[in-house]
Amino acid sequence: MTSQQPAAIAARVRELCRLPAENEWVEFKVDQGEPKRIGQGISALANSAALGGQPAGYLVWGVADGTHTIVGTRFHPSRRKKGGEPLVPWLFQQLSPPIPFQFHEAEVDDKRVVVLQVSPARTQPVAFGGERFLRIDSQTRRLDRFPEHERALWRVFDSTPFEARIAAEGVPAARVAELLDYHAYFERLRVPAPGNRRSALEALALDGLVVPGVSGEWDVTNLGALLLARRLADFPDLGRKAVRLIRYRGSGRTGEAREWEFGDGYARCLDRLNQQLDGQLPSREVIGRVRREIEWAFPPVAVRELVANALIHQDLAVRGAGPMVEIFDGRIEITNPGEPLVATDRLVDAPPQSRNDKLASLMRRFGYSEERGMGIDRVVEEIEAHELPPPRFHKPQGFTRVTLRARRKLGELGADDRNWACYLHACLRYLNGDALTNTSLRRRFGIPDRNRAMASRLIRNAVKSGAITPESAAAPRKAMRYIPWWAAQENGNGGPSS
């Protein structure tokens, strides 16, 4: 919360004085300035502003309660102390969690007024001295005596998406331009940028990247910071959301490693991250008849899609952890905080779900991810096209990890991998209105046509494991088609829906 011009403060005071009475987020006083009561008032205003959906709460000195006449005040917050300590730092130390608040002074109708502006509680009720307060009927009361209000307040916190919460508030427009690279927003959308800063910020506000504040200032949302920040470290809750890329020498984490951290917003850094990824992915040069080509150990399209998914679908509320890409000689692991919202064996076909709908929408509009529900499908298609081992999806201790592995001979794959590959192949075929066949599976694994029996053994084992099932048990053996286990359950074994 930044200092505001006296004229803006005076305008705000006049606006508040036009209210018919004090309310849950506005309180008037003349001279009373006892520190403990001020602290309790901050707690009450922060919680009440959150409950009422207000951008701030206000405690105004110099206005008579009842008449709202501007009478002036002798209260000077800079002169007030508590136990020998200045008032403001003492108040900050008593608040839990700490929230922004600030005293402003101005002259209104030749009378001196003081305004305490308090930010609303964001993630939990604000306590002062270990106790939580709320304004009820224009009075400051202990929150625990009003359980219905407390439950309603917690519902407000639960219903506010992380993307919509405020990362920095009361920021002047010029400072917003220092914190956010809003030109990147227009570049990614491939539209001309407006000719002036205010029009640009108003465009960002339409997508929830910033929010107009009082007196011409702006609040930056978590969404705006995550996408456009010049330095995520400028926003205390987001610094650890930077993407890390680590390249290990060998197949383990104990050997030599190089690390890169991309500490700016995702819309700014993702192109650089992808370029760095391309330079670190194992590859070899293949000399063809006409020209030399690069053969990648992992399809770059699949890797980029998985990286974008890790950014988009991470649990942003997990503090102290962000997306990470680790490259080893024989595999690549992409990890993000938060477990997947659907079972890992249904990621290919399940209806799309996202913790971060606004982030997902903008990343698609920026061209960094597939349409809803198509990303994992495309990854599996790329893996099959390159005849690689199937991707693996894990849930290690509250995280999601996707592992891609370099090419292996079919005989080097374990039984679980072979069955899993058959299952994913059946999923893709089913979603395209088709089914797994001996012929399609031979193409998937690069099995020569003369080795039809090898594909048949793979199919039998996958059926035995329960991963796939015959589309029709009555079909002739050579015409048998197979679908994933869930398709048989959902359609009564009737095959793909038309």
Image (cartoon, rainbow, N blue to C red):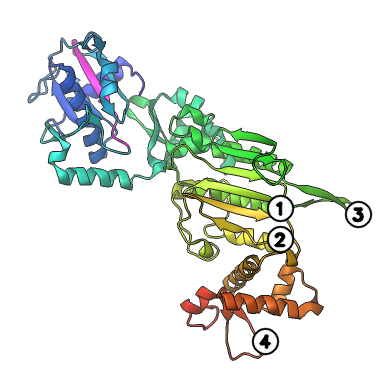
Q: What amino acid type is highlighted by mark number 3?
A: Val
Where's residue 5, x and y in %? 33, 16
For the residues carrying marks 3 and 1, which lies nearer the camera in this image?
Answer: 1
Residue wearing tag 3:
290
- As measured in the structure, the alpha-carbon distance from the residue carrying label 4 to the one carrying label 1 is 34 Å
Q: Secondary structure at mark 2?
A: loop
Residue 186 in view in this figure: no
Q: State left or right for residue 20 relative to residue 406.
A: left
Q: Residue at x 47, y 63 (%)?
A: 351
* Sequence-earlier tag: 3 or 4: 3
Residue wearing tag 1? 298
- Chain-order first, disc 4 or disc 1: 1
Which residue is denoted by mark 2 in the rendering?
388
Kind of residue sitting beneath label 1: Phe
Q: Residue furthest left?
A: 66
Q: Position of residue 98 (x, y in %)?
A: 31, 28
Earlier sequence position, callout 3 versus callout 1: 3
Q: Nearer the viewer, residue 24 or 298?
A: 298
For residue 277, say whether it is visible: yes
Q: Nearer the viewer, residue 114 or 153?
A: 153
